Amino acid sequence: MRVSVIGGGYVGVVTAACFAHLGHGVSIVEVDAGKVRTINAGEPPIYEEGLEGLLKVHAGKKLVAGTEYGPVADSDLSFICVGTPPAWDGSADLSYITAACRSIGEVLRGGKKAHTVVVKSTVPPGTTENLVIPTVREASGRNDLGFAMNPEFLREGRAVKDFLHPDRIVIGSTDPAAGERVSKVYQGLDAPIMRTGTTAAEMIKYASNALLAMKISYTNEIGNLCKRLGIDVYEVMQGVGLDRRVSPHFLNAGAGFGGSCFPKDVAALIHLAERHGEDPVLLRSVMEVNRRQPLRMIRILKDRVGDLNSKKIAVLGLAFKDGTDDIRESRAVPVIEALLESGAAVAAYDPLAVPNMRQVFPQIEYCTGAAEALAGADACLLMTEWPEFSRLDGEFELMKNRVVIEGRRVLSCDGKEGICW
Ligand code: NAD
């Protein structure tokens, strides 16, 4: 099949590379010319394990990127993968979706080829029906187009693997033929396909992310209490997670969740609930626990070293989790903000995310390794679960004071203190 992918960000480039891997001819339409050049050169614009290998094989052959929408007209399907960032009030900003729909519609105008427009971006229930379909229909002047909603569940850091080995594929459509065309694109993957309406598909994505975020905030609240009682929360949640009704995943206590999805999707769900007259007490608590959690690192730090003014604090890990260079909503951000407010000198290290964090905090020191960040430090805060941190040991001897506080449970050395263990 011929597939167009609109937006070459995290989801778009992974989707495109994996569709090419499944044998389809894929065109990425991306407004950022820099990203287009990078993709066509076979280099991923983001770090994702396995992505570079796929791009090296398919870029310039089965997969071509460009800034123009022209290739959409020759495609059987177009997958909209543009961003849906939070607006000022927490609602999802759908302006990129609207722009993409107009451009798709304009290029399909006057055409005869059958085409299905698929929304893969995370959008509030009703968006496909009330925004995407009318916008594309108006811009194209056509009533013969198919529409579907196919939410993406990949996790950054494991995106290629998740895309090629999904737990499930959800396809929402208003007419069965459009849904059938979408399911054909995934032929070759071994996963159950759930067919539903577009609004249910949209809600499945929000409800899934909110539940996972809730598991994390719940675990952190239990962890905070466990620490006071001298109980190991990891042992507790291992016992909890052995229950098949719960599952062992997303039960790791720590500094809270970040990334481009959980915070914005829970905020959008809260906004949606309020707009419809509901009081989403539970969802608001999920966010509040997550807002407070990283600041516990600062409270522990101050208890241990006192006034932070002019103290050198090493921050290990800047990405919102390991395996990615993404710093969106990383828990390291509020921690660094609080350190700077207290007058501390921050020396930071991350294996991948330094260039991204430099744009947010140009004023802090960035190091090329953990040892450099730790040398002469008054304390260390560990913010990301990079496997390489688990091997640190002698490096902590380089510190002025050996005060090591973990926001993620990865260290194997002696003398560390956990945020809630
Ligand atoms: P992103 O910001 O990394 O990428 C979006 C891309 O779309 C950017 O490269 C941008 O330049 C491009 N773009 C914007 N407007 C465009 C237009 N009119 N035409 C063509 N390109 C355009 O975003 P992302 O992280 O890939 O997320 C995309 C969507 O997928 C969001 O709705 C997100 O919630 C959802 N999602 C993300 C993840 C994730 O882990 N990142 C997982 C599942 C779902």
Image (spheres, helix red, strand yellow):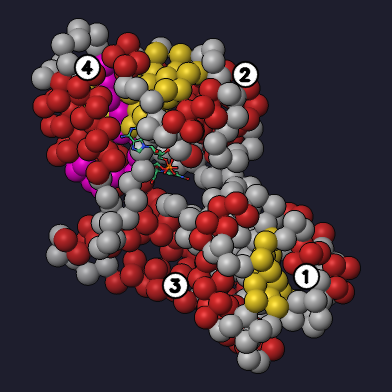
First along the sequence among labels 4 and 1? 4
Residue 327 circle label: none
Residue at the image position 77 percent from the left and 70 percent from the top: 374
Q: Is residue 153 above or below residue 280?
A: above
Q: Which amino acid type is marked by label 3?
A: Arg
First along the sequence among labels 3 and 2? 2
Q: Check the picture and name the quadrant holding the C terminus.
A: bottom right
In this rendering, would 195 be left or right of 383?
left
Between residues 228 and 299, which one lies in front from this camera angle?
299
First along the sequence among labels 2 and 1? 2
> Pointer 3: what residue?
291
In this rendering, would 227 be left or right of 118?
right
First along the sequence among labels 3 and 4? 4
Are discs 1 and 3 less than 8 Å apart at CB? no
Q: Residues within 10 Å of mark 4 (few under 14, many from 20)?
A: many
> Pointer 1: what residue?
374
Between residues 195 and 316, which one lies in front from this camera angle?
316
Residue 119 magenta: yes
> Pointer 2: what residue?
57
In this rendering, would 271 be left or right of 158?
left
First along the sequence among labels 1 and 3? 3
Of labels 3 and 4, the one closer to you: 4
